[in-house]
Amino acid sequence: MGNCLDSSAAKVDSTLSSHNPGASRISSRTSHSSIPSSLTIPSYSGGSNECLPTPRSEGEILSSPNLKAFSFSELKNATRSFRPNSLLGEGGFGYVFKGWIDEHTLTAAKPGSSLVVAVKKFKPEGFQGHKEWLGSLENHLFRRGVQPLSWAVRIKVAIGAARGLSFLHDAKSQVIYRDFKASNILLDVEFNAKLSDFGLAKAGPTGDRTHVSTQVMGTRGYAAPEYVATGL
């Protein structure tokens, strides 16, 4: 799930930020596919009397004194009004532009003489309310202080996510997801699984073709070994 931006806010990712070695992308190429950013998966009907855990609220997320909240106008200046020649890529939630800011004052600076940043401008049509979400499966599995999911809930999520993949594979226009992992499985208030982030998705084989050969893309540790080895 991504943040939403109107004319008053934006998100900045510095190209100098550290990477998480456990979830490094094999490739950062984005897709121009019109595949939706989130897919509702039929819920699992298995009953359980166990209480569902309460997720960490947004109010518990502490702010950092080293972070700066940029206004839309500041990011517009940094990217030279989001010029087309500054476009780095496009994903399901919006466009990513290259910008420049002064390393000390964090204000817009001339290209080539300052810190390079990537600014994501979200698509208005991609807005999605966040109130319904409890975060990703990854948050519930690995975040400290979160109550562990019961086995009944884990099975429900696994079956829901599998049904999502089955829907994509069996559709008339087949879709190869290519980035199936815990952080891309979102959970609603009833812990129904939703697949998100279709930036690496690709259309499946058509006509008489039985497979699609592509550049290997995905997340290390989650991509199928045979796919990583052969690209098929």
Image (cartoon, rainbow, N blue to C red):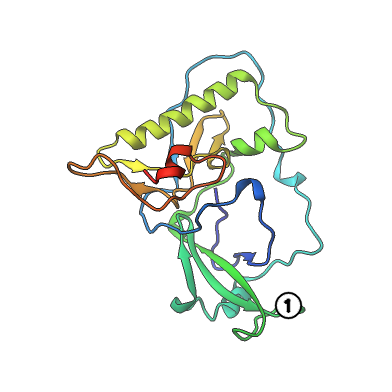
Residue 168 in the image: state x and y as whole percent: 35, 37
Q: Is residue 224 visible in this depiction of the protein? A: no
**Identity of the residue furthest to the left in this view:** 208
Relative to 138, does residue 30 appear above or below in the rendering? below
Relative to 133, does residue 84 appear above or below in the rendering? below
Residue 32 found in image quarter:
bottom left
Residue 165 found in image quarter:
top left
For image coordinates 59% across by 67% down, the residue present is: 8
Q: Observer-nearest residue: 41 or 128?
A: 41
Residue 170 found in image quarter:
top left
Q: Observer-nearest residue: 229 or 36?
A: 229
**Identity of the residue furthest to the front in this view:** 229
Relative to 82, does residue 22 appear above or below in the rendering? above
Residue 164 in the image: state x and y as whole percent: 42, 33
In the visual, does 169 lie left or right of 172?
Answer: right
Residue 117 in the image: state x and y as whole percent: 62, 71
Query: Can you say which quadrant of the picture contains the C terminus?
Result: top left
Residue that badge 1 annotates: 103
**Identity of the residue furthest to the right in this view:** 65
Q: Is residue 179 visible in this depiction of the protein? A: yes
Residue type (three-letter) at the residue carrying disc 1: Glu
Residue count near mark 1 (Cα–Cα under 10 Å), binned few <14, some 14–19, many ≥20 = few
Q: How many marks?
A: 1
Residue 104 in the image: state x and y as whole percent: 77, 78
Circle 1 — which element?
loop
Q: Observer-nearest residue: 201 or 61?
A: 201
